[in-house]
Image (cartoon, coloured by chain):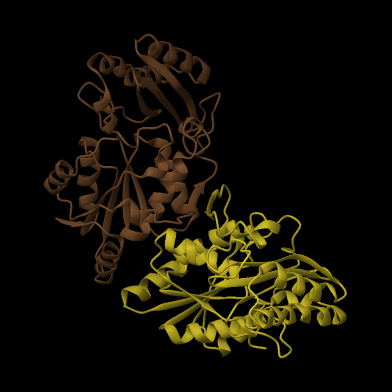
Chain colours: A yellow, B brown
Amino acid sequence: MKIINSIAPMQSFAEALRLQGKKISFVPTMGYFHEGHLDLMREARKMADCLVVSIYVNPTQFGPKEDLSKYPRDFDRDSKMAQDVGVDVIFYPPNEEMYPENYQTYVNVEKVTQNLCGLSRPGHFRGVTTICNKLFNIVKPHVAVFGKKDYQQFITIKRMVTDMNLDLEIIGLPTVREADGLAMSSRNVYLKENERVSALNLVKSLKLAQKLYDSGERKSSRILSEVTGLIKSAPYTEIDYVKICDATTLMDIDEIATQAVIALAVKVGTTRLIDNHVFGDPLNT
Amino acid sequence: MKIINSIAPMQSFAEALRLQGKKISFVPTMGYFHEGHLDLMREARKMADCLVVSIYVNPTQFGPKEDLSKYPRDFDRDSKMAQDVGVDVIFYPPNEEMYPENYQTYVNVEKVTQNLCGLSRPGHFRGVTTICNKLFNIVKPHVAVFGKKDYQQFITIKRMVTDMNLDLEIIGLPTVREADGLAMSSRNVYLKENERVSALNLVKSLKLAQKLYDSGERKSSRILSEVTGLIKSAPYTEIDYVKICDATTLMDIDEIATQAVIALAVKVGTTRLIDNHVFGDPLNT
């Protein structure tokens, strides 16, 4: 496994591979790997001749009051895990190269970023789309793989790639969960033991929503009121949002008629967790 | 010469060339060619195995009160001229493909776009950077060539390419002028005969600025007051701006200490013309 920690050599390595007709797959990450990341890597591994994984805690997607400085990092552990799943290249660039002095260019996807996390994290998706576009230009992948745990991120990246005519395929993979159902997240390490018990109510509430849907319920308000009640019944929880949206436009819908997603963000203790479920999809718990 | 009028075939044509190790040069245009465009094409022709020229009147860079609908177009004339200078491919896409329904992604260069034309044409450069980024992703050039008549555009594109890590070289070529000095522009066809005489005062004022500079003048205000006076002395003229800026940041400067540009936008009759001069550069008239 190769570790490349500068932009120019990454770009020329990718260009040389492409000239040989080799296919590149890519998993962009902020590191501190869990089983969810490894699952993306294993799938991406199968799709190409060379799998590149980037590890970069991107400052422009954190708000001024968010956890940028304390976001968990462990490069040595990450690189061992990456090697074990067959990663070919880790791209690990420094901030000074990614955002040099006088940096001033941003990519913004205007509509699908408005609702959900876009409401409580202004500027977050602008940071995500900007860094992903930069990384795509550096790593030059044929295919990039994202987890659907960050459903709005997945939809936003897909929209950006289509709109900007980036010649690359975006694949979304299902959320990987702990044995008890909690969605894998690097931020789960923040949870205290009793908070972790409360956090389980997030996936339970998604299951409840699917159950109501299966019984024929299509009114968003009725599903949301039951779901909200379940989450609130657990201690240490504070709901940021629970919404039912069109699965493509991410606009709120009153009634489930086409493909719909229930998405939620809940603070458990001081840790903000997100989860979601597309109605009708399997919910692996 | 090949004419490609759809995104997917352009992208696969470019990708196939790249796989063969061929170099692609690119001149993005809005068509209605004049000698300035042809000069860019001739130079770009020398730089690569395949020269692609796009013709696309990009709606997102026009303001609601600007000349989008009456912008001059003549595809047949343009394609003959392109063929004569050795263009290999004209890329001529339709609006429905470039901005399909639900289009929502924009690239914004935040600082160098603030001053000069950015002040009087809000949103203009956001349209320019968005379309250029899209075209770069479609045409996949190794080098793209721009005219320095649109100096702020040239600086903005260079900044975007650097910030977004686009793996391509941006070349700027000097403004091509009519025999009498008027900067070539597709909009010159709008000028009535007596307006055209007034329009000559733009280049005369740039020459005057260089003359003052040569005589040792470094105070922007003194140069600007003489230049402004000269332009105002001609009938049918209305100054949008005349400014002296740092040639890289495009911020106003009071005193010329590093490389500086004098840039101006003047309405002559109803036609808005721009011109500029980097102090010390040759002024070919």
Q: Is residue A139 visible?
A: yes
Question: At x 64% / y 75%, what residue is drawn?
Answer: A31
Residue A210 location, quadrant:
bottom right
Query: In this orientation, which residue lies closer to the viewer: B186 or B221?
Result: B186
Left or right: B253 in relation to B90:
right
Residue B217 position (above or below residue B95)? above
Residue B276, horizontal then vertical, whole percent: 38, 28
Query: In this orientation, which residue lies closer to the viewer: A138 or B256?
Result: A138
Residue B19, horizontal then vertical, whole percent: 27, 71
Rendered-image quadrant of the C terminus of chain A: bottom right
Query: In this orientation, which residue lies closer to the viewer: B234 or B172?
Result: B234
Q: Residue furthest front?
A: A216
Q: What number of labels is visible?
A: 0
Residue B75 position (above or below residue A5)? above
Left or right: B155 in relation to A83:
left
Q: Is residue B219 visible?
A: no
Residue A16 position (above or below residue A110)? below
Question: At x 48% / y 54%, what residue is drawn?
Answer: B104
Residue B78, horizontal then vertical, whole percent: 18, 43
Query: In this orientation, which residue lies closer to the viewer: B60 or A18?
Result: B60
Residue B173 position (above or below residue A265)? above
Residue B15 location, quadrant:
bottom left
Residue B149, horizontal then vertical, whole percent: 34, 34
Question: At x 56% / y 50%, what residue is drawn?
Answer: A103
Left or right: A121 in relation to B242:
right
Residue B191 location, quadrant:
top left
